[in-house]
Every structure is written in structure tokens, then in C-alpha cells.
Amino acid sequence: MDIELRGITKRFGPVVANAGVDLHVRAGEVLGLLGENGAGKSTLMNVLCGLYAPDEGEIVIDGRPVTFDGPSDAIAAGIGMVHQHFMLVPVFTVAENVILGIEPTGQLDFLDRAAARRQVREIGDQYGLRVDPDALIEELPVGVQQRVEIIKVLFRSADVLILDEPTAVLTPQEVEEFFGIVRALRDAGKAIIFITHKLDEILEISDRITVLRGGRVAGQGDPETLTTRQLAEMMVGRPVSFDVEKAAYAPGDVLLEVRELTVLRNNDEIAVDDVSLAVRSGEIVGIAGVQGNGQTALIEAITGLRHPAGGSIIYDGRDITHSSVRARHAMGIAHIPEDRQRTGIIGDFTIAENMVLNSYYDDRYASGPSIRWPEVMQHAARYAADFDVRTPSVHAKAFQLSGGNQQKLVVARELTRDTKLLIAAQPTRGLDVGSVEYIHKRIVEARDEGDGVLIMSSELDEIVALSDRIVVMFKGRIVAEFDAFRGPVDRNAVGLAMAGSVSEAAA
């Protein structure tokens, strides 16, 4: 199936999200779609999926113009989308999620569960998406959940697959496996639109690349000849630095000390096993590790989101092991959470309200029990502009923002507070290269001004670029440590430690 978008324009009041966009994807190819946060990628794909009707332009399938009155029309035409935030019911099985809405029935119209399981297995075998049809979604790792989302789309006979930030939550190992799946789908004749901010990945997986900027096509090219720097400049309209500049390493006193910490998962299994580490003022400590090796539980314990089963947490000379989240905020601890939607924002609150979620009670914004809204609005408008949160107004609801702009909202809130310690989990997840450059600069500024910084990221390049020291977690323990200030860190050695090969990493 070949699909063309011709002259697509979409407006939301005075805001022009797409302006005369042309896009063409053919059967048996991967089209990389690149653009900074707010460039119009999601809006364009929502038009293609029937969620929005274009104000101008047309959709052409195999040479024939079509009109979609809703998502069901797009699905019937063979178009499916795997969203960045998965649309799965956690307590349902894989098969139940796949068939939801188009359940196969047998005699007397009863649900044919056996047929559902069989079809899931057949699709998995055909495209290398093997997964247990009877497994509960909430018990599956993120990479397998993504496979379920793709199976859902294929179950509905999609010939065009839109993959929105598909590697945002995957480990490097899962990314390689996922690319194998994408190539298998391409080789089977599927047309694939691959949306991402990761320049190396789009060069590796794409057959052609289209770049959007400001709602328009800013350029197109061949991944065989394009470079990451060319793509970055095409995206943001200016040269982008990929280097992180830091002042000389001059740490102060220990600011955060974790002593023999043990943290349990919800099922009472050990997530963090007798971990000790320290963060000094004026240094960045990076936590590297494959997702699921205890980093998340460690961050949750330090920030008060999870109670430790043993050990202690000392901050600025005070034992905060059992202090509340609000008390830790008041002590000057900033937290950029790993999951922006679950623990970072409240979607139904406005941007202004989200900007002061953990400081609305401060004297800056409150007089007794009353919030001084003019001050809140002024604060929100200033920092939304500073951090390039793309929104028509700070009165807009947070759920209306793209994922990248939601992330920038959270980062703006935390980095503009008066803090001593910054704890950042996946701080640049879903951000374009220009925004990543800016966030990295602000994190380094916090370090250079004397804050302690503890950063956890699935992006090994980010950890290596930012950190003064790197600790590697594997199966709940710290298994290796690297001092970046003594010289360049060997990425291969860090990767080996992440895989548990500590002796090889040390060698």
C-alpha cells in the first residue's frame, strides 16, 4: 500500500499545527519522520489516523483520494498506529488486549478465546513478535508490551504502521531486537512511518527521512548520505552542539549518602540490595544499568516515593529515610521523575497549575490559604518560554501537550526551584536534540553552582557525557564504578558491567 498526504493543513484556532505538508510512504519501506517537539508530527499522524480532519489537503491511498470520518475508517483502510504511551489494559492478558473491540466469536456468539490465542501466536511467529498470549500485561517488561501493541495493529490487518517514539522506553538491547522486528515488517511489504528524536536510530533504520519544523517540511534526504549534525540543524534551524561543556571537577562535601539501602518491589522481591553511594555538592553522579535492575526503586526510595526495607538515606547531614515527599522538596531536593504522566504532571491541570505543583504553598505564590494566581501565571509564562514549552497559553491543560513538551514542563518546574540536590530520572526522554542540548546545559549549570546531581538514564551516551562519576547497577547491586574526571570513560566497559560482566569490564 502506498499513502500520500498532499498539502495537509491543520489549525487549532490561531495555531497552525501543519501547513501544506506533503508526505509519501511506500509499501516495503521505512520512512523516518523527524522533528523537534511541537513540529507537528503527532498532529499529522492524527490526521492520517482519522482522529483529526484536515482543514486543507487530502489523503491518497494507492492513487485514490480518501476521506476518514474517524479512526475506524483509517483502521478499515489498513492504517494502524503504535502510540508512544501504550494503550493496554494492565490486568488483561495479551490475547484479551489484542482482540479488544473486535473479539472473535464462536457458536452462540460466545467469545472464542482459543481462536484469539491462536491468532496471536500466528502473528508472533510470522513477524518475530513472540509473546505468551496468556501473560498479564502488568507482568511484562516494557519491550514485550510494545510487541503486544504491534500485534494489536497487525491483528486488525494494518498495511501501514505508524510507530511513535517506539524506542523511547527501550534498553539498547531491546532497541536492537526491535529493529529486527521493524525490518521483518518492512520485508513483508508493510509501509512503516518511524517517528523519533534519536538521530543515530533514524539513520540506521530508515530508507528515507522527512524532517518537519514549525509545521512544515524542512527537508528530506537519504540516510546513506545525511549526518546527525545535518539532521539536527534541519530540525531546529541552527547548528546544535553534541558536546557537554563542564567546568573543572571540584566537588565539595558529601550532600547525599545512601547507606546499605534495601528496597522491595510491590511483590516483595528485592529490587535494591544493600546499596551504598554518595553524591557530593558540585558533582554529577550517573546511574547506568539495563532497565529493571533496581535503578527506579533506588530513585523512588531517595525521593520518598517508596519506603525502604532497610538502610538509611542521609541528606545534608539529616536522616530523611522516613521523611515525606513534601518535606524533601522543602529541604531543597528537586526530582525529575521517570514517568512524567504517572508522577510528573496532572493531565487535567493547566500548565500554570502543574508548574507550581510542589511549591503552590510557598510565600511566593500563597497568602495563607489563598493562592496568588497572578504570580503563578507570571511564573509559569516565564519558564514555559525559557524552556520552550510549546503551548498557546499557560491556561491549556497539560494533557494537550505532546510528550516532549510535557517533559519540558516537568524539567522547567524542577530546575527553576531553589535546590541543593537534583535527582533526574530519564530527564531528556522524548526530547529533540535542541531541547536535550538546553536541558544538559541547565543540569551542568546546577552542578557548577554547587548542587549535587544524581542522574539515571537509559541513554548510555547521556550518562557518559554528563557524569563526573558513574555507578553501574546490576540485579539490584552496584557492581562497578567509573571516574569520568580522571579521563574518558570506556563505553564498552560500562556496557559490559551493565550486562553483569564485571570482571571483563574491569579488565
Image (cartoon, rainbow, N blue to C red):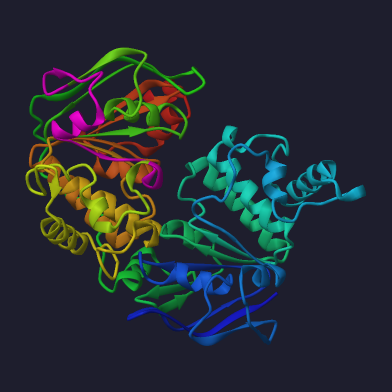
Q: Is residue 340 covered in magenta? A: yes
Q: What is the x, y in percent for residue 212?
A: 41, 74
The structure residue drawn at horizontal position 68% and vertical position 86%, both measured from the top left corner, is: 63
Q: Is residue 419 visible?
A: yes
55 vs 312, nearest the viewer: 55
Q: To which quarter of the image does residue 503 belong?
A: top left
**Magenta segment range?**
315-342
Left or right: 147 as drawn, with respect to 490: right
Left or right: 49 as drawn, with respect to 75: left
Quadrant (top left, top right, bottom left, bottom right) of the C terminus: top left
138 vs 12, nearest the viewer: 12
Q: To which quarter of the image does residue 161 belong?
A: bottom right
Q: What is the x, y in percent for residue 435?
A: 28, 59
Q: Is residue 283 visible?
A: no
Q: Using the image, determine if residue 400 lies above or below residue 339.
A: below
Q: To which quarter of the image does residue 389 belong?
A: bottom left
Q: Using the image, determine if residue 366 lies above or below residue 437.
A: above
Quadrant (top left, top right, bottom left, bottom right) of the N terminus: bottom right
Q: What is the x, y in percent for residue 87?
A: 56, 51
Q: Is residue 384 covered in magenta? A: no
210 vs 484, nearest the viewer: 210
Q: What is the x, y in percent for residue 494?
A: 38, 33
